[in-house]
Amino acid sequence: MANNILKGKRGIIFGALNEKSIAWKVAELAHAEGAEFVLTNAPIAMRMGEINNLAEKTNSQVIAADATSDEDLENLIEQSMEILGGKIDFILHSIGMSPNVRKGKHYTELNYKFYSQSLDISATSLHKVLAISMKKDAISEWGSVLALTYIGAQRIFPDYNDMADAKSLLESISRSFGYHYGIKNKVRVNTISQSPTATTAGEGIKGFNEFINFSDQMSPLGNATAEACAEYCISMFSDYTRYVTMQNLFHDGGFSSTGVTQQVVDKFAE
Ligand code: NAI
């Protein structure tokens, strides 16, 4: 199915932890579509070693970077341009983590140190990536930066906890930076709001299994898969979507526009 639509493009892909990761699927497809890229993840995630298999498969190099560290990000962006031989055309931010979710803290009783870590890792990191890229003039004109988000930014899903706040911030950063980077260098910045997906981060949310079924039945097309999300990401990195910027793009099988489906109503019939 590959059509080489990313031929000649250079990228940085954050967040491939294992085969289930959305970023993993994006890397596989970007490779098939002719892109060259650097893979990156937090040093702690590297220890699991799976990313090296992906690097081998996609003929790419891996650079460790904690997305909250300015120093790591500066090094990552400089080295990526060196390795790839020029400015970057696309960046995938596929990073999310909440210590409050991990430690089972209720939203009404958050640990605020954890809270700022959730925001730092899951949202402010996008600002840092963009600010450092801008300072180093590291992204080509018409370059495309994408971050993955969830509809919990707009609507309450009780167990999504402080990730809802982090995603609201992430989407706002994408819009605001999209304005400034668009004016300065014609760089576009968008978020893709993906259906619940069975990955390490997704499965960390309480009640995920029930929730993914609910979402599936509330979406006319069913939940979008990680593979389908990767396809959407590739189209957003390609030149076919050059005037799309500052958007939060729902990739959710219609969930976000659905009030209720017959399938769900039927469950209440007695
Ligand atoms: P994943 O667990 O495979 O990916 C999350 C990644 O974040 C991991 O690779 C992890 O190592 C990385 N990360 C955590 N802390 C980091 C740090 N300090 N520095 C650098 N990287 C760090 O899970 P998934 O689902 O592929 O998540 C990717 C993105 O998609 C996240 O932003 C997530 O919130 C978003 N998303 C996921 C959905 C789901 O249901 N799985 C639904 C909608 C959005």
Image (spheres, grey):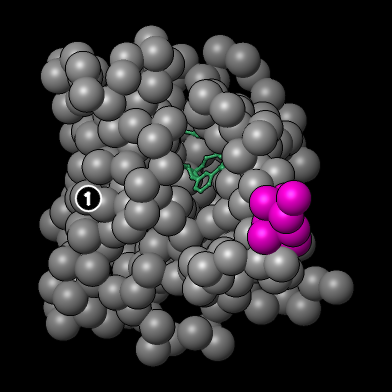
Q: Say left or right for 186 vs 221.
A: left
Residue 268 belongs to the span the image colors magenta: yes
256 relative to 204, above or below: below
149 relative to 113, above or below: below
> Residue 128's spot in the image, x, y percent?
20, 46
Viewer-closest of 234 and 166: 166
Classify the position of the N terminus by image quarter.
bottom right
Residue type pointed to by label 1: Leu
> Residue 78's spot in the image, x, y percent?
31, 46
252 relative to 149, above or below: below
In this figure, what is the number of numbered marks?
1
Q: Which residue, given by chain and number where applicable, does mark 1 sit on?
A: 169
Residue lying farthest to the front in this orientation: 270
Query: Toward which corner of the image does residue 159 lie, by quadrant?
Result: top left
Q: Is residue 206 visible?
A: yes
- Give me the residue at 66% from left, 78% from top: 5
Q: Which residues are magenta?
A: 263-270
- Give me the residue at 39% from left, 62% from top: 191
Q: Say left or right for 176 vs 83.
A: left
Q: Say left or right for 4 vs 97.
A: right
